[in-house]
Image (tube, helix red, strand yellow):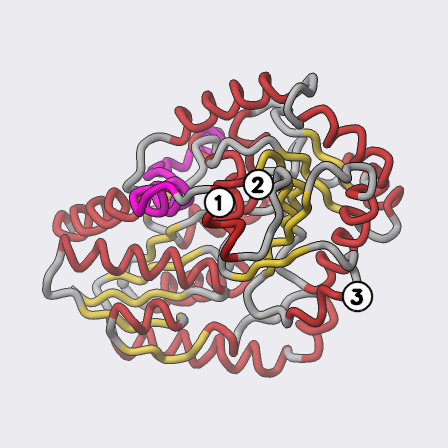
Amino acid sequence: MKYYLIVGEASGDLHASNLMKALQQEDPQAEFRFFGGDLMKAVGGTCVKHYKELAYMGFIPVLLHLRTIFRNMDYCKHDVEAWRPDVLILVDYPGFNLKIAEYIKKHTQIPVYYYISPKIWAWKEYRIKNIKRDVDRLFSILPFEVDFFKKHQYPVCYVGNPCVDAVDEFRKKGQETAETFRTVNSLDGRPIIALLAGSRKQEIKDNLSRMIEAAKDFPEYQFVVAGAPGIDPSFYREYMAADTKIVFGQTYRLLQQAEAALVTSGTATLETALFRVPQVVCYYTAMGKLVSFLRRHILKVKYISLVNLIADKEVVTELVADGMTVENVKAELSAILEGGDSRARMLDDYDCLIERLGAPGASERAAKAIVCSLWKR
């Protein structure tokens, strides 16, 4: 069968590439055409456009590139229509993908499937109307989404979470000793606290300097930054203390050795929990009081971290907007270090979270469901 996939960022490239591999196992004759990235290219098929040509983040960059965005969107619509795949598989990236779904549903008979649901439960809940109208099947990677969509009379299939797969695959390679990790990265013998300050320059700028300032109260620990891919090491130096270390391409190795972590919200909070590393979620933004107000009155969810959203309770402390102060970071970090008041409770909650997420195999389960449903059509 012919599969057309559309992703718009690096995480989508990763998840889509794993899905493609699983589809090949279920359907050895699978043909792929896609808007994607290097990982998808490595699996095979035709890359129509790289996601880097699509990925504009923030209001101003999007506004400045509107003509390019619309041109890419039109090209994509007509390319899908001309290739006539057996299924169109959309991966996250809702601003672009929901427009494609609308067009394909209106002008063709091609079934539209969505892998990794748009996060309309956080905001833009009105998009449920478009999803119900334009998407034939939706495959979720977050267990609480099942009840959310059920509330809207739209059934979804929970297939598991790819982060579980990624951490499981990493662990299968074996346990690295703390001594080896320290030697390779020129670290000393003090316990490690991991700093995961985000993947975008603005996040790093806003959060890392405050994390480092808080670290001064913990001289018995060494703080190690997980460098984000695509960010030049020189960018970090402006916000780091002279004795702070940074490692690139080693986030899982770092988490495996860390006693605790300060994490900017995102997938990293879930990955940190899967490694059972106690954490404080730190997300500073300018105009903190205004952001806190908008969060309380506009966002539809109580939490910003995936850990708390999945657990449906406060497992990890979230220091957000005006709550992300150096003093608050110090207090919350003290509580999750060895002997701290919150450490044991958090680790117990992690175990419940991991059980709720289910076993590895998200890509395989999604591929089986996709192929099975297509054969039945």
| Quadrant (top left/top right/bottom left/bottom right) for the N terminus | bottom left
Q: Which residue is mark 2?
A: 269
**Residue at point 29%, 73% (across, down):** 33
Residue 212 in view here: yes
Residue 44 placed where, x, y %?
Answer: 24, 72
Q: Residue drawn at (56%, 77%), measured in percent from left and top?
A: 69
Identified at 75% across, 29% down, the residue is 332
**Residue 265 at what x, y percent from top left?**
64, 44
Bin the neighbour count of mark 2 within 10 Å (Cα to Cα): few under 14, some 14-19, many 20 and up.
many
Asked where in the image residue 245 lies, by quadrant, the reply is bottom right
Give amino acid for label 1: Glu
Q: Is residue 53 above or below residue 211?
A: below
The residue under label 1 is 179
| 296 versus 222 height, above or below | above
Residue 271: tell me if it is visible: no
Badge 2 element: helix
Residue closer to the observer: 64 or 98: 64
Q: Which residue is mark 3?
A: 238
Labels 1 and 3: the sequence-earlier one: 1
Q: Secondary structure at mark 1?
A: helix
The dot on residue 250 is: none
Q: Which residues are magenta?
A: 147-175
Q: In the structure shown, which secondary structural element does the residue marked by tag 3 occupy?
A: loop
Q: Nearer the viewer, residue 102 or 56?
A: 56
Q: Position of residue 241 (x, y in %)?
A: 79, 56
Q: Amino acid at mark 3?
A: Glu
Q: Residue at x 66, y 19 (%)?
A: 339
**C-alpha separation, residue under disc 1 versus residue under disc 2:** 25 Å
CA separation, marks 3 and 2?
25 Å
Separation of marks 1 and 3 at Cα, in angstroms: 29 Å
Would you say residue 162 sits in the magenta stretch? yes
| Mark 1 vs mark 3: in front | 1
